[in-house]
Image (cartoon, helix red, strand yellow):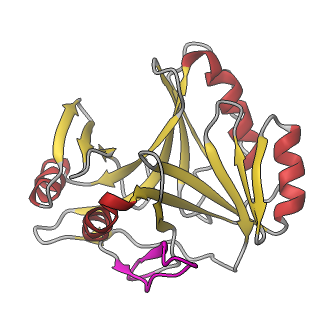
Amino acid sequence: MHVRWLTAFFDFPASEFGAEVTFWRAISGSTVSPPRGEFKEFATLEPFHGDPYLRVQRVDGGPGGMHLDLHVDDPSQAMLEAESRGATVESVADGVVTMRSPAGGVFCLIPWRNESVRARPIRWPGGGISIIDQLRFQVPSADFGTEVQFWAGLTGKDAGPTEGVDAVALNNSPRLSLQVVIMRTDESIASAHTAIAATNVPDEVERHEGWGATVVARSADCVQMADPCGRLYCITARNPRTGV
C-alpha cells in the first residue's frame, strides 16, 4: 500500500459540534470550509499554507472520537492489503472504505486527490511556533505489539522490537501531513488523540486555556489538555518543523 497523505478526522457529537469546531479552528490557526455532505455534516479546517489534513464531522450517536483517513491510489486494493494484515471492514460506500485495526481503532481508506504540500507551523503573537502534527493511537497493552506491526506495515515503516517500549513513532516523512504514534495504555479499548509540537509549551498552554481548554496532567516535555468539551490532546516540546 502506498499511503499518499493522511488526514486526522475529529468526530464530534451534534451537541458539541459548533463549539468544538470553533476551538480547533482557533488553536490550529485555520479557517473552516463551507459544510458539505447530505446533512452538512462535514467540514475542513483549511491551513493558511499547504493542503488540508484536519477535518471535522458531526456524528449522530455516541461520544465521538477521532479516526485517521489514509489517502491511497486504490481504496479497494488497499482494503485487501489491510485485511491481510489483520484489519476488518466496517463499510464500503461512495469510494470510502471504513475499517478497524486489529486493536479496534477506526480508520478509512479514501482516494488520493493529489494532496502533497504540508501545512506550515503557525507563528503566534509572542513568537511561539506550533502545529498539530501527530495522531496518537492509545492501544491496550495486550494488543500493543500487534498494532505497532499493523500500522508499521501500512505506513511502510520498520518498527523494530516492541518489548519494553511504551510508544513507537512511525512514518516521520516530509511528504506526509501527520506522524502516526502508537502508545501503550492500561485502558481496555483503543482510542486516539492529537499532539501539538510547540517551541514554547507554557505560552501554548496559556493560549489554549484562553480558548477554554484545561490542563489535565504535566510532565517534563508534555502537557495533557482537555478541550472545552473534554476531548483529550497533548502539547509537546518538539520542533514544529521537524517533529523531533
Specify whether residue 6 is painted magenta: no
Q: Magenta stretch: give its range.
A: 31-49
Front-most of residues 20 and 113 = 20
Residue at the farthest bottom position: 34
Front-most of residues 58 and 191 = 58
Front-most of residues 202 and 192 = 192
- Tell me if residue 200 can be seen: yes
Q: Which percent across, then down, holds residue 139?
A: 55, 28
Q: Is 67 placed above or below 48 here? A: above
Q: Residue at x 45, y 49 (%)?
A: 64
Q: Is 139 placed above or below 208 here? A: above
110 sits to left or right of 28? right
Q: Which percent across, then down, holds residue 136?
A: 48, 42
Specify whether residue 48 is painted magenta: yes
- Tell me if residue 162 can be seen: no
Q: Which percent across, then down, holds residue 50?
A: 49, 79
Q: Which percent across, then down, holds residue 227?
A: 24, 50
Q: Is 149 placed above or below 114 here? A: above
Q: Residue at x 27, y 36 (%)?
A: 221
134 sits to left or right of 80? left
Quarter the N terminus occupies: bottom right
Main secondary structure found in the magenta portion: loop
Q: Residue at x 48, y 59 (%)?
A: 59
Q: How many marks?
A: 0
Front-most of residues 183 and 89 = 89
